[in-house]
Image: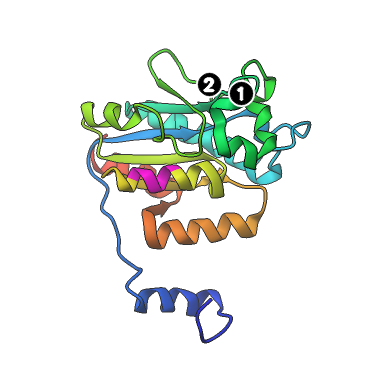
Amino acid sequence: MSAAGPQGAESQEADYERAGLAGQLTPGTSPALLLVDPARAYVDPACPLYAGAGAEDAAKAMRELLSVARRAGIPVIVTRVVLRPDGSDGGVFYRKVPSLRAFVEGSEFGEFIEGLAPTTTDLTVTKQYPSAFFGTALSTYLTSHGIDTLLIAGLTTSGCVRATALDAMQHGFVPVVVEEAVGDRDTRVHDANLFDIRHKIGEVWGMGRVEEYLARNGI
């Protein structure tokens, strides 16, 4: 909201453009797919972190996106959260979000959503904090493999997806968040975060545009 008061979607876009928040990033020619925390916790109603239809729809899209990535032959990276039984390696984050106990080692809620588990040829990144980059070797892996662009999907939009997209940009990788393949427990929060990502962090593309990008670059 600007000083002028509440705005509709059209005037909000215009306001951001006038403020110089309308730049676009051009993805490179060496992408990888990054699935952020496709965990059962977000799609199982028995878990406090259950994110409802937003997560369930995103999981379906993630399966489709994963198939596209495998046909294209691009690297696939899948993250997961695994915490010690007392949550001590989660630090302040664990104290702030007690429901992260769903990810203590051995919890069924920390298991991958059906159809989204990494294969032996994928990279699995284990983390304790929102960003896939924080405290992990992800940046080194991407650099050593010549990756310049990250196609990002996963859960949830306002949490680990946003944090990962921000760190991708800060590490010099072009982040492209795949709109249908991310979700959150509240559509308003989901939409607001995609708006911010699109204007301040990276690109937000639909599935069709991602497929066109891969085909156009002969990937």
Q: Secondary structure at mark 1?
A: loop
Q: Are marks 2 and 1 in contact (CB under 8 Å)?
A: yes
Q: Secondary structure at mark 2?
A: loop
* Quarter residue 71 falls in: top left
Q: Position of residue 145 (x, y in %)?
A: 23, 27
Question: Residue under circle 2?
Answer: 117
**Magenta highlight on residue 97:** no
Q: Quadrant of the C terminus?
A: top left
Residue plotted at (69% across, 44% down): 53
Amino acid on which disc 2 is placed = Ala
Q: Position of residue 155 (x, y in %)?
A: 56, 40
Q: CA distance from mark 2 to mark 1?
A: 7 Å
Q: Say above or below: 203 vs 141.
A: below
Per the rendered image, the range of residues in magenta is 164-168
In screen coordinates, is 78 left or right of 148? right
Q: Main secondary structure of the magenta part?
A: helix
In screen coordinates, is 181 left or right of 142? right
Q: Say above or below: 213 vs 20.
A: above
- Could you say which is closer to the camera, residue 92 or residue 73? 92
Amino acid on which disc 1 is placed = Glu
Residue plotted at (41% across, 46% down): 165
* Quarter residue 122 falls in: top left
Q: Say above or below: 184 vs 191.
A: above
In screen coordinates, is 29 left or right of 58? left
**Magenta highlight on residue 167:** yes
Question: Residue under circle 1?
Answer: 114
